[in-house]
Image (spheres, rainbow, N blue to C red):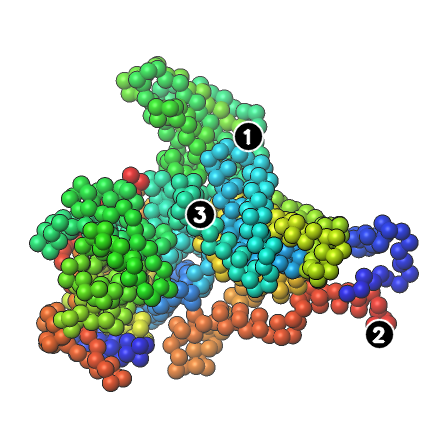
Amino acid sequence: MANLHPAGVFDTTYDEDMSIDRTARDKLWKNLAFAALLLLPLLSVSGPLGLKLVSDQYISLIGRIAIFVIAVQGLNLLVGYTGQISLGHAAFMAIGAYGSAILARDLGFSFWTALPACALLTGLAGLVFGLPSLRVKGFYLAMATLAAQFIIPWLLRYPLEDWTGGTRPLSVPAPMIGPFAPYAEATLSDGEPWTIAAGDPYFVDVISVNLQAGAGVEPSIALRNPAGDLVLAGDINMTVMENPGGQITGFSYIAAKAGEYRVEISAADSAGAWTAAATVSKALSFSTDIAMYYIIVPLSALLMFLARNIIRTRTGRAFVSVRDNDLAAELLGINVFTYKLRAFFLSAVYAGVAGCLLAFERNSLSLDMFQLDVSIEMLAMLIIGGAGYPLGAMFGVTFIRLLQEAVIPFARHSLADLLPQVFPFIDAVNITSAINPILFGGALIVFLVLEPRGLAHRWEVFKVAWKLRPYAY
Amino acid sequence: MKTRCCFLLALLLCLGAALPGLAQDMMDYPSELTACETDMTGDTIHIFHFGDLSGPNAFITQPIVLAVSDAIAYWNGRGGVCGAELAQVYEDTGGNLEATQSAYDRFTSEYADELDLLLLYSSNDGELLREQLAADEIVSYISAGSIESLYGEDGQTPGWLYASNPLYINQFGFFCQFVAGSPETFPDPVIAFVTWPGAFGLAGTEPAAREYCGSLGVEVLPEPQVFLPTDSDILTQVQNAVDGGANILYTNSLATGPALLAGTLVDLGLEDEVKLAGVNWVMDTSVGLLGQRVLKPSGLPSVDGMFGSMPFQWWTERGNPAVDFITQQFAAAGHGPQAQNIAYLLSWGLVDSIIETTIRAVNAVGSLDAVTGADIRAVVESMDYSVMGGLYQFIFEEGIRDSPMNRAAVLKFANADMSGPATSSDDALMIDDGAGGKLFVPLVIPLTDFMPVPQLRGQ
């Protein structure tokens, strides 16, 4: 599609020719759209302003869309721009998800350091599974990348079971900034509970207790939440410290729910043989959907922007030449193999970031989240959105997710009442369960027949028509 | 096959209808619900549930919608519960975790003030939503959850999900108890898992379960043999297990899984040497029907004699008020016979549990609007309630999130006069399948009373 400018706008420099936002108006609209996206959670029911103008469901939905936009944008770099098909993208997401979860849970990384580390790790895995692209392409390469979809989950499930939990789900802590300096401190004594009024979903209170006990003295430590329930060691917000002998030496608890928390320490026969210091600090938590939104959406926008810029570089142009004719590209001096590998690396990095965000957004990981159907679904998103278009990933993911999570559920409620009356000879439960697949499959078929080049192409057509108005022809 | 199944189950219904219980007028509701202290006229009690209605487990879960609909129609036709109407809000997730998250977000957004109690179908959904349910203070009822969904990663941190069946690992421990107590049936027992992959399939393969069974004198082979739900040939897995010394094969699989396992044993000529067993799902009607594709030398279906758990009453246990009532309602609703399965039976029980919980919570706080998830949880943990007068016991003491009781049972096929199990095809009840063939009629026979299950989680 021609890169048309509004009437009267001419490129007179190379910078102007290369600019993404050629006019101030382009830039303004883009910035306004981004600002509106950032303001949306503030208007939501659970937002800090309590305005209740936007349902929380849509904030969560946009967050999920943004995660998959990152993943599909990575696929776009590989499939859309470099012409290398991949059926193992969900497995790369799994590496990012499990890698970051393990780094955060077991190796003491924060989310902020785990994110780039796991992105790099996933990129390296992408390089390994990109090696077959030297010798095969097309359907054969698709089959080779399919191997990633089988090998990676198998590795995560069995050889790495001690780290990943295998088939069992893995809890993932919420991202946090802090804790900052303590704002309350206390020295605890036997039989005298310490009560703290704490808890906030965004600026959480981190209650920490450090215990020092004499040899042979094992005081019991208990924390009770505002409901009066004992907080157990397995609580996702609780971190228990133990010495090498397995004796508990303290804990750290993230209090997100407002109310009174109570710390009790007692050692029945050894009063005075221990000392305990307790502190409470503030920390910025990203445990809620709204808070995670402010990580996911800006990061998604940034990675979209970077992807677009990559395509405008020497590397990007090499990708496109490999896609269009790899023999011609080689004759032009492009090292086809290294550029294919670079595309696999970048694609996997994007998948790793998306996987990491998915893990921290869900707070729970399972290998069922990264099965082959997810890889195929992402490929479908890209094709529907428009492979090889910068906005293809965004359009494709948004279309599919809105169809699945907003349009079909809305239509289904009406159809679930209507269809059993229209087809009384079919069991109602069979009709009910068939509505989702029929509507989803039907919509995809209709769409692909009417717009086979993707939504992004239609968007480009619309933009050109708009710029040429009123002389569309 | 579907036609045959339909015909068989239709005939089962006809047989049921011939029994004296059904010849009488419609039965009264079988349980004594707590008396209402607050009139809820004008209110609506929503029953929220979502799960896989169109995905791989749909053949088991679809009847949940029918059962909940029937229960709602029953109650609303009698003026509701304490004057309040019942209504259901449900969603099909197709077994996809993305869709599960989406459904949960939608429910918690649209029904933020009402959603205090949620029905879930699968362990995977429970695992995904465990922390979110706790954060949002929403109690969830589920038929059988995994350790991680009910008790967290450490197996010791109870959450907000409550399961009406025992944990699968506890069911396996219970089976070891049963095996150890039945040396004549199981001499020198060695168990091998031949099972599906995943959290459900591999439940019970944990070292804690193996050690517990070992302490009872029941050896469990350490390496499970795994097959996929789509596999049609598991000869290698079965042969590996038998070569490893196993004389009992245990499976956590559904419908086609146990049937395939049983058929393979018969193909290998090992049906007399090696016994079969599994979780409560192997007792389902689907196993009894699918297991008829391969017959033993006695002429009976390959799954004849398969052992399993039966932690609730079953369709064939006529005389139990809950079973009789549900059977009568099922027949009256005129559903397709494929719906007469575990899910339909248990869903009536879950609706009954929701009603009883709600009444108690409203009695405690004064109005339906004032009830919170914390109130529901407090009620749940104080209840000792016989669901529908005897379908199963609803009792969750502090810290317990799964049913502590279980029974051992065996899958058999009815004899010609329906007085007990057949010993061979000669004395079996054979019914016309409507396609020129014959079908056997499956029976589930309890072998023990309800007994406590061992608690093996988190060890």
On what subunit does the disc labeled 3 rest?
Answer: A
Residue found at x 61% / y 44% = A295
Residue at the extreme left of the image, as rendered: B184
Label number found at residue A393 = none
The image quadrant that residue A394 belongs to is bottom right
Residue A285 position, x and y percent, is 55, 38
Residue name at image x 11 percent, y 52 percent: B187
Say which element carries label 1. Answer: loop
Q: Residues within 10 Å of mark 3 (few under 14, many from 20)?
A: few
Query: Is the C-beta separation of discs 1 and 3 under 8 Å?
Result: no
Would you say residue B190 is visible in this rendering? yes
Q: Callout 1, which amino acid?
A: Pro
For the residues marked 2 and 1, what is the alpha-carbon distance in whole angstroms?
A: 62 Å
Indicate left or right for B56 with A353 as reference.
left
Residue under label 2: A473
Query: How far apart, in angstroms, are the residues tagged by discs 2 and 3?
Result: 57 Å
Q: Position of residue A71 (x, y in %)?
A: 59, 53
Judging by the rendered image, the residue that carries numbered circle 3 is: A155
Label whose residue precedes the other's in the sequence (2 or 3) = 3
